[in-house]
Amino acid sequence: MAKATAKSKQPVFLVVVDDSEEMHQALQFACGRARSVGGRVALMYCIVPAEFKFWSGVGELMREEAREEAEAKMAIHADYAKNLTNGTPILYVREGEIRDELLELIDQEHEISLLVLGADTQSETAGPLITFLMANGASRCRVPITVVPGNLTDEQLDALF
């Protein structure tokens, strides 16, 4: 009976929202996968903490501005995902070091079933987060990781589903 319950669970595909161009390919892939299997998309944005310790008022203002910027970016990507999947994505905004926050979120939120990341195809490395996960972070990640090349078109990604 436990297997039937596990199979009826709706899979959730987590995408890390950032300013990279390849993030679009990760989101496109996650939306296609969610649409094809009846799953959901989740978006995570990580705010890097401000380094202002001496002037707490300035630091707090910077935090508020960073939070507003995060919410604005998330809204754009959430609308895009909703249009592609006909479902409202799950949104997570965290503050801290992206590596730690990502792994902690995946550990805490058991409905997350796959991490989808876009790979930078314009540089020597796939990106700092992918490099970290492939070097030693994957051993701490409880879900599979899908890396989507950043040079694929929406049509190429849609053809996969």
Image (cartoon, rainbow, N blue to C red):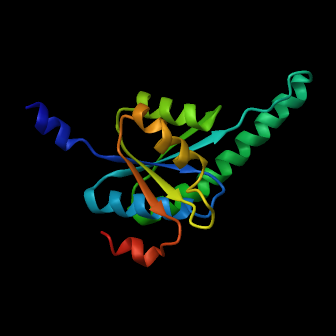
Q: Quadrant of residue 4?
A: top left
Quarter of the picture holding the C terminus: bottom left
Give the residue drawn at x 64%, y 33%: 97
On screen, residue 55 above or below 105: above
Query: How many numbered discs sit on the rendered protein?
Result: 0
Residue 2's place in the image compared with 66, above or below, is: above
**Nearest the eye: 64 or 137:** 137
Residue depicted at 87% across the width and 23% down the height: 56
Q: Is 72 situated left or right of 78 in this image? A: right
Direction bottom: furthest residue: 155
- Residue 138, quarter of picture: top left
Residue 156 placement: quadrant = bottom left
Tell which residue pokes out farthest to the left in this image: 1
Q: Compared to 137, does 42 lie above or below?
A: below
Q: Residue at x 73, y 32 (%)?
A: 49
| Picture coordinates of residue 142, whole percent (x, y) | 36, 34
The quadrant of the image that shows the N terminus is: top left
Residue at the right extreme of this rendering: 55
Q: In the image, is 42 to the left or to the right of 92?
A: left
Q: Residue at x 48, y 75 (%)?
A: 153
Give percent across and percent down for residue 152.
Answer: 48, 72
Q: Position of residue 159 (x, y in %)?
A: 34, 75
